[in-house]
Image (spheres, helix red, strand yellow):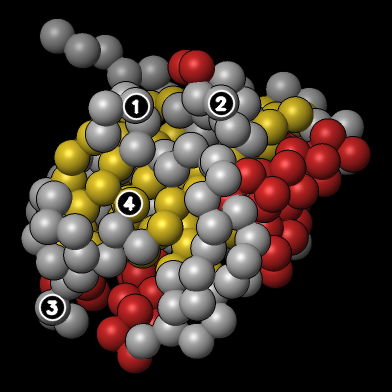
Amino acid sequence: MVIEIIHIKNSRELELMKEACVIVARALQLGGKAVCPGVTTAEIDREIRKYIESQGARPSFLWYGGFPGSACISINGTVIHGIPDKTVIKEGDIVSIDVGAYLNGYHGDNAATFPAGNVSKEAQRLIDTTRESLYEGIRAAKAKKRIGDISSAVQRYVEVRGYSVVRQFVGHGVGVNLHEDPSVPNFVTPGHGHTLIPGMTLAIEPMVNAGTPDVKILEDGWTVVTADGKLSAHFEHTIAITPDGPVIMTLP
């Protein structure tokens, strides 16, 4: 039997966590502005790390489980956990950046997919759908609702538009630890899962594929790619459940 421990934050804890979330949102914004043809993913990673550390925080991902970058930077058919390296971004690529920052004993987690120059209509539609599916999930994250209501909102929005949600990787609680209970899948039956309680903090993160939902992990043990080689996009916000509705913490 698996016992899940869900950390409920008080107002002071949420204030402290908010500081980490603002830093990570600004770092992601900086990384997104750096996405352009001719730039390497390692160069973007260095800029993100430099900014996070300049704010007195530390990159949550750096050496987390052995991951060698400050950000996960994933191009085209790479879904998540792309390792920053000498790979050069090309015109028409779509680039997903996932960033975490740790400050005051709390983590913030934020991700988005950015176009490099002019991208195809198909690629832009995938980006737009994934972004909007995140906000559909956030709107469903109301106190007394359930995790499954978030999941169902994301899945419905994605699948009616002909895309698929990744099932092997999901969103999660976040706070004192980068990954906390509960899991937040992007697929499930509404009305199922944990009840949403004020003080819960969640990282909602749709990973949406243009083709099948299937993925595979490369030999480096980190890089997750679509099984069919088609495009994938990824968006994420850290939110807090409050009596007055969900609050997005990762805003710059």
Determine whether the residue tagged by mark 1 lies in a helix, strand or loop.
Answer: loop
Give the vertical position of 8 relative to 37 (above or below). above
**Quadrant placement of the N terminus:** top left
- The residue pinned by badge 2 equals 68
**Tag 3, which secondary structure?**
loop
Mark 4 lies on a secondary structure that is: strand
Tell which circle, 3 or 1, labels the residue nearer the N-terminal end. Answer: 3
Classify mark 2: helix, strand or loop. Answer: loop
Whole-Å distance between the Cαs marked 2 and 3? 35 Å
Between discs 2 and 4, the one toward the N terminus: 2
Q: Earlier in the sequence, mark 2 or mark 3?
A: 2
* Side (left or right) of 175 relative to 65: right
Q: Rounded to the nearest whole Å, what is the CA distance between mark 4 and mark 1?
A: 14 Å
> In the image, which is nearer the foreground, mark 4 or mark 1?
1
Q: Nearer the viewer, residue 59 or 25?
A: 59
Q: Which residue is mark 3?
A: 162
**For the residues marked 4 and 3, what is the alpha-carbon distance in whole angstroms?**
17 Å
| Residue that label 4 marks | 79
Q: CA distance from mark 2 to mark 4?
A: 17 Å
Taking the image as shown, residue 108 lies to the left or right of residue 103, namely: left
Q: Amino acid at mark 3?
A: Gly
Task: Determine whether, in the image, residue 35 is placed left or right of residue 76.
Answer: right
- Residue type at numbered disc 2: Pro
Residue 157 percent coordinates (x, y) = 23, 74
Pointer 4: residues within 10 angstroms few (<14), some, or many (20+)?
Answer: many
Residue under numbered circle 1:
220
Give the foreground label among 3 and 1.
Answer: 1
N-term-proximal mark, 4 vs 3: 4
Q: Position of residue 13 (x, y in %)?
A: 71, 32
210 or 169, nearer to the observer: 210
